């Protein structure tokens, strides 16, 4: 990312604060860093407000950002890896917690329902919210950007506690699951603007009553193509990346049910009945052991490798013959775009939401029904036989360039006048 190698001098203006539970994982957390890098490049001060000091990619944290976190424990390996970044372990939490730590809409109505009180008492959300409120009073940020449902709930509570207020933009990076709906309905209407990362995700806001007219926006996740291309050229140690003629399939994602890796393994077994191939699945998760066992039962264990989480998946994508997204649902699957940046041919399930938008209805890669291993295997075989042109894939990925996304976030957070009057 540009700001990590050539940081701008930190603005003397009040900062923009980005609220996210941690910097672990590949989804909204990584996008928080991309947005931070873009805002820093434009001369704005940026703070990250974390619940837990955990980061899977410390080298991508831009210089110039400050990190505040609630948990005094933190992760020592992360802290030592971020020695170039000012990490500020200030709890900023009143003790005892104020009784008005609650969702603003409910505060006006009096006591919280007993079920909701039990939910909050059993979680760490109120302590994180009180910490954010303390930060707001002491640092007086210009705006808050909440990166998911949990962060939005914490920011909403913090707004009810803080004496200083800030414009807030709340984002949604995934379809709303049933257990998230209650929290989302109580917190998103409080935000000044809400952002869905694809048109499909923006449609999820229809489930949340009370959103102000004109407050709903679609902003595609930012992609730093130059950074991805640079990382893709780095050496990577894996015996299957030697380009010896056996086609290589790569998949990336957390090893959980909604990523559909069981379907992918069944499809890959069908593909091997037609031609030789190998597959690398990058990611960690609770289904790892069951997926390894499934590969063994299907007779493909010797052709499938599960290396776990890797800091640089782009070096794998640049050397792969095919990237496959097998998800049951998504929001805007960034890995699909990143594969296209690397010039890697792609196949995807036609899941809600994002792949159809990215691939323009199948123009840039096949879309197959969710959970259909026969259709997925047929599409994989077709693309291996006739791959998409690398240049066309890269051109389409350019539509998701970071500059366009950061421009929109800058305007939503600071307003047109604030975005225009960037610090020198």
Image (tube, helix red, strand yellow):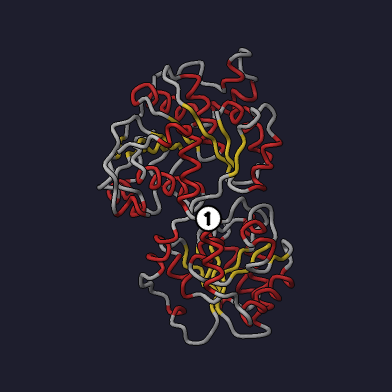
Q: Is residue 329 above or below residue 161?
A: below
Quarter-of-image position of residue 362:
bottom right
Picture coordinates of residue 405 (x, y %)? 50, 47
Quarter-of-image position of residue 399:
bottom right
Please tell me which residue is depicted at 70% across the width and 29% down the height of the picture.
209
Circle 1 residues within 10 Å: few <14, some 14–19, many ≥20? many
Picture coordinates of residue 410 (x, y %)? 45, 39
Q: Is residue 16 left or right of residue 371?
A: left
Q: Is residue 119 left or right of residue 141?
A: right
Q: Nearer the viewer, residue 337 or 113?
A: 337
Query: Disc 1 designates what residue?
Result: 400
Q: Is residue 200 above or below residue 411?
A: below
Q: Is residue 272 visible?
A: yes
Please tell me which residue is depicted at 56% across the width and 49% down the height of the picture.
220
Please tell me which residue is depicted at 38% across the width and 47% down the height of the picture.
37
Picture coordinates of residue 168 (x, y %)? 50, 30
Q: Is residue 381 above or below residue 146?
A: below
Q: Quadrant of the N terminus?
A: bottom left
Q: Is residue 61 above or below residue 171?
A: below
Q: Is residue 302 visible?
A: no
Please tell me which residue is depicted at 44% across the width and 45% down the height of the picture.
35
Picture coordinates of residue 244 (x, y %)? 47, 87
Q: Nearer the viewer, residue 37 or 149?
A: 37
- Under circle 1, the secondary element is helix
Q: Quadrant of the C terminus?
A: top left
């Amino acid at each position: 990312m540009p700001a990590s190698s050539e940081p701008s001098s930190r603005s003397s203006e009040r900062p923009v604060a980005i609220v996210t539970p941690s910097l672990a994982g590949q989804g909204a957390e990584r996008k928080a860093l991309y947005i931070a890098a873009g805002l820093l490049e434009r001369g704005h001060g940026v703070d990250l407000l974390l619940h837990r000091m955990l980061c899977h990619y410390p080298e991508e944290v831009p210089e110039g950002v400050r990190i505040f976190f609630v948990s005094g424990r933190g992760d020592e390996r992360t802290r030592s890896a971020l020695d170039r970044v000012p990490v500020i372990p200030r709890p900023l939490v009143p003790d005892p917690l104020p009784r008005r730590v609650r969702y603003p809409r409910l505060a006006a109505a009096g006591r919280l329902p007993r079920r909701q009180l039990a939910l909050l008492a059993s979680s760490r959300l109120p302590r994180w919210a009180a910490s954010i409120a303390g930060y707001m009073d002491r640092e007086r940020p210009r705006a808050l950007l909440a990166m998911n449902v949990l962060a939005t709930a914490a920011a909403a509570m913090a707004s009810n506690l803080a004496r200083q207020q800030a414009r807030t933009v709340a984002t949604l990076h995934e379809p709303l699951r049933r257990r998230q709906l209650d929290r989302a309905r109580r917190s998103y209407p409080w935000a000044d603007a809400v952002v869905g990362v694809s048109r499909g995700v923006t449609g999820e806001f229809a489930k949340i009553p009370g959103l102000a007219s004109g407050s709903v926006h679609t902003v595609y996740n930012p992609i730093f193509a130059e950074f991805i291309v640079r990382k893709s050229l780095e050496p990577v140690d894996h015996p299957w990346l030697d380009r010896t003629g056996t086609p290589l399939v790569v998949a990336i994602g957390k090893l959980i049910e909604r990523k559909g890796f069981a379907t992918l393994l069944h499809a890959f077994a069908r593909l091997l009945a037609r031609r030789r191939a190998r597959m690398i699945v990058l990611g960690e998760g609770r289904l790892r052991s069951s997926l390894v066992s499934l590969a063994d039962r299907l007779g493909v264990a010797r052709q499938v490798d599960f290396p776990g989480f890797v800091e640089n998946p782009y070096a794998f994508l640049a050397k792969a013959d095919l990237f496959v997204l097998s998800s049951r649902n998504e929001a805007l699957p960034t890995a699909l775009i990143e594969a296209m940046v690397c010039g890697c041919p792609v196949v995807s399930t036609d899941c809600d939401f994002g792949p159809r938008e990215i691939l323009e209805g199948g123009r840039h890669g096949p879309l197959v029904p969710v959970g259909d291993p026969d259709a997925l295997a047929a599409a994989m075989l077709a693309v291996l036989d006739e791959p998409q042109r690398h240049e066309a894939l890269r051109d389409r990925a350019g539509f998701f360039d970071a500059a366009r996304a950061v421009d929109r976030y800058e305007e939503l957070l600071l307003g047109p006048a604030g975005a225009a009057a960037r610090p020198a």
